[in-house]
Image (spheres, rainbow, N blue to C red):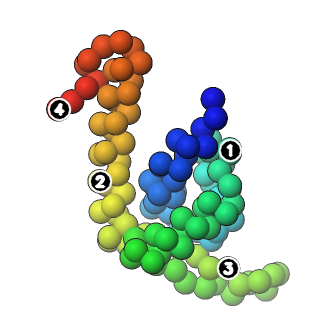
Amino acid sequence: MDTTQLLKGVLDLAVLAVVDGEDGYGYDIVRRLRDGGLSEVGDASVYGTLRRLYAAGALTSYVVPSESGPHRKYYGITPIGRSQLKQQRDDWAVFASTVTGLLKGTREGVTA
């Protein structure tokens, strides 16, 4: 199954969840997403998502100097981001339950 379209729909949620656990710089966040099972996530998609979430006030950023290479821009979650993460987690739980119910051929997962 090509998960590209599915990933686009949940990338904000996944990025917020990863950053909620610990601040990180761009490639570190990509690596954590991949290590978490999203092996097909693209660098450009994640960097674009980070910029968009930052512009929306869901993330904050700060630069950490590095002696062994370029400075790194770290991202952390803001109260707006935590609120968005909670809402998206709730939405995901309902959506996943609904789709699971449909796939099993039952209506138990379907909510009004």
Q: Residue 22: where, in percent of width, then height?
A: 51, 64
Numbered disc in front, either 1 or 3: 1
Q: Residue at the location (71% across, 84% down)?
A: 71
Q: Residue 82: where, in percent of width, then height?
A: 34, 63
Q: Bin the neighbour count of mark 2 within 10 Å (Cα to Cα): few under 14, some 14-19, many 20 and up.
A: few
How many discs mark residues in the rendered view? Answer: 4
Q: Residue at the location (32% across, 71% down)?
A: 79
- The disc, 1 or 4, on the residue closer to the chain's N-terminal end is 1
- The disc, 2 or 4, on the residue closer to the chain's N-terminal end is 2
- Residue 105's image quarter? top left
Q: CA distance from mark 2 to mark 3?
A: 30 Å
In the image: residue 88, left or right of residue 19: left
Q: Amino acid at mark 1?
A: Ser
Q: Residue 26: where, in percent of width, then height?
A: 64, 68
Instruction: Give the answer, above or below, for where 103 lies relative to 51.
Output: above
Numbered disc in front, either 4 or 3: 4
- The disc, 2 or 1, on the residue closer to the chain's N-terminal end is 1
Q: Which residue is mark 1?
A: 39
Element assignment for label 2? helix
Q: Amino acid at mark 4?
A: Ala
Q: Which residue is mark 4?
A: 112
Q: Which residue is mark 3?
A: 72
Q: Bin the neighbour count of mark 4 within 10 Å (Cα to Cα): few under 14, some 14-19, many 20 and up.
A: few
Q: CA distance from mark 1 to mark 4?
A: 34 Å
Q: Which label was assigned to residue 87?
A: 2
Q: Amino acid at mark 2?
A: Gln
Is residue 10 or residue 83 the one in the foreground?
Answer: 10
Q: CA distance from mark 2 to mark 4?
A: 17 Å
Where does the N terminus fall, quadrant-wise? top right
